[in-house]
Image: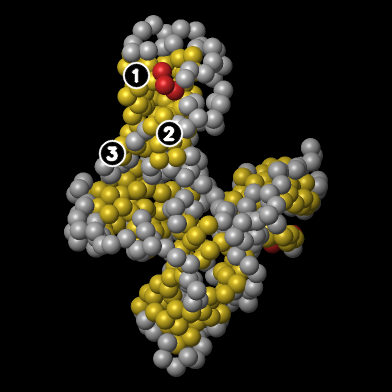
Amino acid sequence: MRFATLVTIGAIAAGPALSHGEHTPLYGGVVLSLADHHVEAVFKPDGKYGLYFTDATGTAIPATDASKVSLTILRPHRKAEMIPMRLGDSGDGWDGTGTPVADRKTTVKISYFLGGKPYTSEILFFSSSTNPLFHIDLHTYPEKVEANQPVRLSLAIQNSDGKSVTSLDIVHEKPIHLLVVSRDLAEFYHIHPQLTKAGAWDVTHTFPWGGSYRLYADYTPHDSGGVVEWMDLEVEGPRRPSIKLTPDTQLTKAVGSLRVTFSCDTPLVAGNDLQLKFRVLDAKTGAPVRDLQRYLGAWGHIAIVSDDLQEFIHAHPFDPEESPEHPSLHNPPVIEVPTGFRRPGLYKLWIQFQRNSVVIPVPFVLRVAGKTEAPEAPNAPRDAILVTVSSAGYDPAHIEAKLGQPLKLAFYRPDAQNCGSVVNFPDLHVSRELPPGKTTIVTIVPRQTGPLSFACKMGMLKGQLIVR
């Protein structure tokens, strides 16, 4: 779950404001100060909402003292969602259930009466990005998106200073990978916006059905780590029946000219590094396929989305026998993809192959189990620099070092949902495994000044030592 940041953007209340005491949340939510009391708003990842009231000194106010409690969720390009609120069974607060708040620029409006006086406040969730230094504003042309009608999706990327971002690294042959799924994960699209003269990143797409869609934008600003940001979009028009997501019992799928079998040498458990394997055969002959064409520079592309849309993985195969200097002429009979899952649950996976100039997406639905032990907290010695490894890259990614002096780096991977299982310092011929949920100490001695690069084994996560 990527937790959004909360910011109070307004509160209207009757009566003079009093001096307020403790603002610490009691239920893990965000506390708003209104006139003579506090209200704590709780938004859980499973879509459960709660409102709790205390007076200016922090003493609990019975939930029955409040009335006409309402909560409304306003999301970009979607209809307002009214959350039915009721008195909680414990009598401590008001409860409600709806769609989880996980969208950038989602506004939550809270209204109620307390002591016979009306109160209204708003909370803005302003980030759904893996990197808070960048965000996307999505615009659609036409503004009303309808099924079976082309729509131009325009992504305006801005940095934390509000400036447009028009310089993106080319990753797998494209500056942005936009992966689109329907709410029930029955539909999947992989499209690529391009930079326009206006400084936005545009692509035209036609949605075949009405309904709710989530868009995941995967991009890498220049001199920054990778960013994944999601946006929700509501499409008007006829809707197809929702398809229930259930785990596949048959892990061989025939799609187009291919028959693909999924396997993994170890159990699918969250928090572990996994090597997903796909054996690719010809659908008619059953013979191993060796004539795949590279799709966007790789033998395959993988997208994985959790059933609640909160987890997204964009991964690629790794061929240990291949190098940039000597690329393989033929695909291996088994495509291997290193990845991992941050949390247990139900996931849908699509792996895209290209054969005879046709892109073939092959879907699988997987159940991922939970890990029994919790990950360790970062444990960096005082004389070490802590480097956190995540899907967004290394943090920090640029580190000062001194020529000839030992430098101790404490690499910490909080989870396995990234390709950082190994860190390589190619110029020093140093390579170390980085288990998820652990801190790994790597000590190096720079032997020359200038930049010294380090990266994961796939070269997707990159960092640099600046040796002086």
Q: Name the residue tied to disc 3.
A: 80
Residue 40: percent from left, percent from top: 47, 25
Q: Quadrant of residue 102?
A: top left
**Residue nearer the viewer, 277 or 246:** 246
Q: Name the residue tied to disc 2.
A: 95
Determine whether 358 is above or below 145 in the image. Answer: below
Q: Is residue 425 visible?
A: no
Quarter of the image for the C terminus: give it.
top right
> What separation in Å lies between label 2 and label 1 (alpha carbons)?
16 Å
> What separation in Å lies between label 3 and label 1 (alpha carbons)?
21 Å
Circles 3 and 1, Cβ within 8 Å, touching? The answer is: no
Q: Residue at x 61, y 56 (%)?
A: 370
Colour theme: secondary structure
Q: Is residue 358 visible?
A: yes
Q: Count neighbours of disc 1 (C-alpha within 10 A) and say few if under 14, some if 14 to 19, many if 20 or more.
A: some
Q: Count neighbours of disc 2 (C-alpha within 10 A) and say few if under 14, some if 14 to 19, many if 20 or more.
A: many
Residue 358: percent from left, percent from top: 35, 78
Residue 254: percent from left, percent from top: 42, 81
SS at badge 2: strand
Q: Name the residue tied to disc 1.
A: 113
Q: Residue at x 49, y 91 (%)?
A: 287
Task: Say what amino acid the circle numbered 3 marks.
Answer: Ala
